[in-house]
Image (tube, grey):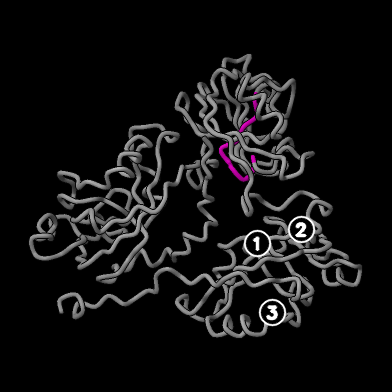
Amino acid sequence: MTHSVQNLDTCEDDFLPRDSMELMPACDHTEIMYHGTSREAAKSIQREGFRPSSDGPLGRGVYLSRDLQKARRYPLEPPESQRVVIKVKVNVGRVIAINRQGHPMQKTWHDLGYDTAWVPPNCGMFPSSLEEHCVWDPKRITVMDLIYTKSPKGLSGLMPACDPTYTMYHGTSRAAAGTIQREGFRQSRDGPLGRGVYLSRDFKKASRYPLGVSESQRVIVEVKVRVGKVKKIDYQDHPLRKKWHDKGYDTAWVPPNCGHKGVPSGREEDCVWDPTRITIMNLIYPKEDDFLPRDGMDELSDHTEILYYATSRAAAGTIQREGFRQSSGGPLGRGVYLSRDLQKARRYPLEPPESQRVVIKVKVNVGRVIEINRQGHPMQKTWHDSGYDTAWVPPTCGMVPSGMEDHCVWDPTRITFVEILYPKYVPQPFSLAKLWR
């Protein structure tokens, strides 16, 4: 069975300002939260609902968090490949903040009429310093979805520890994936790290491969890997670059952004010598929005993309009624500036407070596309004069301070409005008067 793996950095459902986690949930408010558990326990929860734990730092209840990164760390014992995060809606009811160890109502809050206890981040209650909720009545919780975990954000920048099991990804063609399922992986004859099976914990890297195959014919093989003894190969002329296995290592690892010429993407790479260390988990087929920009202008052209445009609530209404208009200028000249990166879009516009910003989701027929990958490109602001419809700035090329990708579409009629994404949680100031009213 194939599960869709949500991109935890760009999923629309995670359009929640991280700063709002520092604010107490409003009473009688519905919140999106997450609960980390094992795959087996998740099935039971889907069938029977949540059950309160018998005890914990806040006493009995169901422990949840608005912080997805925290939820994905749990439970601690099973390997990552056996964990799952349950996404839920919670009517929090009456909420109390428990902001220190030894709080007089740390475990008795429900006896005093509260429905949810909330531990704010960075208050010293938990070693992780991340926020936590304890909900007394499981009936306040509605299961929405299961999120099957990928490698945690930033994990690909950490060297794999020796002997544990990791979730990794291998990009291949649909035809080759069938062979791999039937016969298992085989060593490549050569590569930047020599013989072995090339994998990555970086899902986005795997999604780019194989390069000679159209995106619709690609598939990602999700695997578990028992890495064994690991050797870091962090520069091109490393003496063990292709001899690591001769020295007793089972896996070679290239860290991200280390300048290794054999990995021009700058993303992490793993080479596993023995294919029997690899267990196939799932095949992940491409869906709309699952992949990064294609390599090369020809593959980008004449394609419909989902993009995002950030603006104020007031301006969004005008755009809905009248459509987009070209900006008078910008780093790519005139046009409408958009991005496939939702996280980039939600940073803008800079002036209004976050509660007054929205993101407009659109479909764009990009037409003929040119890549503008450096300041001073000869067609940086004249690309439309040469017959291009869209200019594309790839990520991490130095053109955009954020390091994220950008698009400039010349003709606003190529853009079709889809919907407006509002922030899930509008920050509300904490008031003791309101709390005790």
Residue for badge 2: 303
Mark 1 = which residue? 306
Per the model, the C-alpha gap separating discs 1 and 3 is 15 Å
Residue 360 location, x and y as percent? 59, 72
How packed is label 3: few (under 14 Cα within 10 Å), some, or many (20 or more)?
A: some
Q: Is residue 143 above or below residue 16?
A: above
Task: Report the residue marked by disc 3.
Answer: 324
Residue 337 rendering spot, x and y as whole percentages: 70, 72
Image-based side of 50 in relation to 68, left or right = left
Residue that appears at 35% across and 45% down: 36
Task: Give residue 116's position: percent from left, percent from top.
Answer: 21, 61
Q: Are marks 1 and 2 in contact (CB under 8 Å)?
A: no
Which residue lies at the image location 53% right of the left edge and 44% below the top edge? 4
Look at the image and give the residue range highlighted in magenta. 197-206
Neighbours of disc 2 within 10 Å: few (<14), some (14-19), many (20+): few
Question: Which amino acid, mark 2?
Answer: His
Q: What is the C-alpha distance between the residues marked 1 and 2?
A: 10 Å
* Near-viewer residue (229 or 274): 274
Secondary element under disc 1, as helix, strand or loop, is strand
Quadrant position of the C terminus in the picture:
bottom left
CA gap, disc 3 to disc 2? 20 Å
Q: Residue furthest right?
A: 386
Quarter holding residue 254: top right
